[in-house]
Image (cartoon, coloured by chain):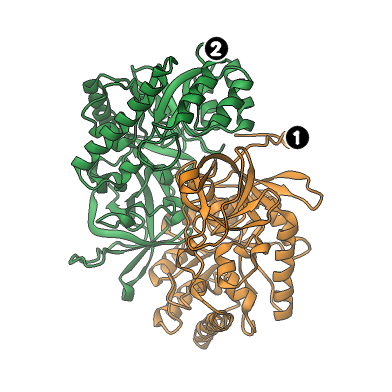
Chain colours: A green, B orange
Amino acid sequence: MKFGEEELPITTPALLLDIGKLDANLARMYAQVDRLGVPLRPHMKTAKSIDVARRALNGRPAQITVSTLSEARYFAEHGITDILYAVGVTPDKLAEARALRNVGVDLSIILDSVEMAEAVAAGGAVPTLLEIDSDGHRAGFAPDDPALVEAARALASVGPGAFRGVMTHAGGSYDCRSEEALRAAAARERLALVEAAERIQASSVPCAVRSAGSTPTALFADSAEGLTELRAGVFMFQDLVMAGLGVCAIDDIAVSVQTSVIGHQAAKEWIIVDAGWMAMSRDRGTASQPIDQGYGLVCDAAGQTISDLIMVAANQEHGILAMRPGSMATLPQLPLGTKLRILPNHACATAAQHAAYRAIGADGAELQWQRMTGW
Amino acid sequence: MKFGEEELPITTPALLLDIGKLDANLARMYAQVDRLGVPLRPHMKTAKSIDVARRALNGRPAQITVSTLSEARYFAEHGITDILYAVGVTPDKLAEARALRNVGVDLSIILDSVEMAEAVAAGGAVPTLLEIDSDGHRAGFAPDDPALVEAARALASVGPGAFRGVMTHAGGSYDCRSEEALRAAAARERLALVEAAERIQASSVPCAVRSAGSTPTALFADSAEGLTELRAGVFMFQDLVMAGLGVCAIDDIAVSVQTSVIGHQAAKEWIIVDAGWMAMSRDRGTASQPIDQGYGLVCDAAGQTISDLIMVAANQEHGILAMRPGSMATLPQLPLGTKLRILPNHACATAAQHAAYRAIGADGAELQWQRMTGW
């Protein structure tokens, strides 16, 4: 449902974004990458918003990472044209990638097989990075896979600029349980990528770009030696999973879902709210962490956490709030209509359930910030 | 991303809807409610689509159930005006409910406290149903709660039509594990609602509407005696959770996510596809069932299931396919770019991740069908 900049209906559930916390999260990441001496290519898959992107790129190089071609189109239409599409390309997406390049977008793509490298090369140069598997998490060439060098050669044979370099994403860092583990994950990610780049260069193929990153490894890296850029996205908003990893404090979380109390089940010590999984997502990312936050941690209308009150269950448009199992605290009295904020397990998943942000400035004023969706 | 009726880009991931299966699911439900002698008020929270609603209401009374006021606005704008908003109303949603009534929408609301009944009554009549808790699942008055009669009286005091009746949703039926349990859940739901209605009528307040339903209980009810309507939504699409309950066959599932193979991790026996949780949702509704389908069951491009191949893990735009743990079958050879369909755990959650349907007719022709979102 569309509404103009003038009229922001006070409806729930709604996605809130605290601009002050967003800015603090951005400042922390930029301090880190400046210390490491490497540029950031922020991943826009979490925010999917030109308004957030402008805030994130303020005075910095306008280069971003995206997770879909629709994000690439959207950000290009809004003037950001240096874009890495960081999900393995398929043959039938190449036409759209080339079309974006033909209208002036410096789009680069990634892949992780000789077969796909040859398919790209057969159609002429699209700047390509080879994906490296630095932690066994998901996709990518092992750094010592001979096919890696073969793929680089296949691309480089098309001409200068066709093979741009290597990239990796240390998704396994989400399983770290200590600061030492986070630092070690960052070092492993970097060393795997540098090893891959050196193998390629040893075969006389220049490997200009070495792009690594995830929010935990970017924030906890001790060194960026051998890297040319870092990528991260969720750091802008942070979330309960990141707080559970020790990557941020709960108070750093910039997004929340505003909700209203719609009922009580006194005998069960339940409070029912109008934010269910449609507003929160079904993400249960803290379920495997030492502190399980259910479907989210409850705050009052001003954003102060309410001790031990979590969303223990979610239906489509109903959330059930209750005290965390084992809590000694008492269920608070929250009358019908009370406004609350729920902090999400996973900012990417929760934000994806909403069509726009209600962005709240330091003065309390609310702006509507865009969010895009789809493929 | 908008695209017209003429151009349907063949992109993945995308939400497919098999119109033939939709029609068969509708025919089955209508045969059941006709046998029971009670009208259906289909719940549009699953489909959220006027195109699906027209198919579902074809020749039947144009009365629906919705889960948000934005759905009520959307369907009213498309000419369906007999609407039950079946999530407990809050004080600050009453203005919008009244506004919809003032433009001719026969919107009815629900609530489950004397406090909210008095808040509604104070502002003048909005036709209201009292929610009954028939299985301890979520919200509602217990049928024998004296507050139920008090709330009915508070509403009835405003004038004729202000108190419309009682409703319940047997959400607990999703935990049934046998046909007998499903039949028993349907009987419990009906008897709890009839008990509540009789208590209200015993206090001389007429209780015209007795509305019950969920897909499992509506399909397995042996009787609708004492009820005036049934509600259900997911039955139109069905899903793996319903199949796991024995409510439908896997072949009845009308929605799937079309995806492309984007990579292989041969050593791990993984196939990587471009549908992750953004396309499937994070719903893991089969995790607690005897057969855990991961993030979805894999079919070939024509919709034939591939034995024991499931999505074992999902990142935002990556799905990892592998053989079901313990399977004796062999991982199929699926080259890069191969198109697949993934059947969802939960149709409501998966459909909610998409902006439109690619609806496929019996002749294989594809149409774009609308889907709305938001609150």
Horizontal arrangement in the rendering, residue B191 relative to residue A202 (left or right): right
Q: Position of residue B216 (x, y in %)?
A: 58, 73
Say few, some or many: other residues with alpha carbon within 10 Å of mark 1 (under 14 / 14 to 19 / 20 or more).
few
In the rendered view, tell whether residue A138 sits above or below residue A341.
Answer: above
Residue kind at label 1, given as amino acid type? Glu
Query: Does any portion of residue A113 appear in the rendered image?
Result: yes
Q: Is residue A324 above or below residue B79?
A: below
Q: Quadrant of the N terminus of chain A?
A: top right
Q: Position of residue A184 (x, y in %)?
A: 23, 37
- The residue beneath circle 1 is B6
- Residue drawn at x 46%, y 82% as measured from the top left: B143
Name the front one of labels 1 and 2. 2
| Quarter of the picture holding the C terminus of chain A | top right
Q: Quadrant of residue B310?
A: bottom right
Q: Is residue A10 visible?
A: no
**Outermost residue, right direction?**
B363
> Is disc 2 placed on a helix, strand or loop?
loop
Left or right of A258: which side holds B84?
right
Front one among B374 and A205: A205
The image quadrant that residue A32 belongs to is: top left
- Residue A35 got which mark? none
| Residue placed furthest toward the top | A160
Compared across the picture, whether B255 is left or right of A86 comes to right
Which residue is denoted by mark 2 in the rendering?
A159
Position of residue B339 measured from the top left corner of the image (x, y, whole percent):
64, 43
Q: Gap between marks 1 and 2, in whole Å?
A: 38 Å
Q: Identify the chain of the residue marked 1, using the numbered disc in the image.
A: B
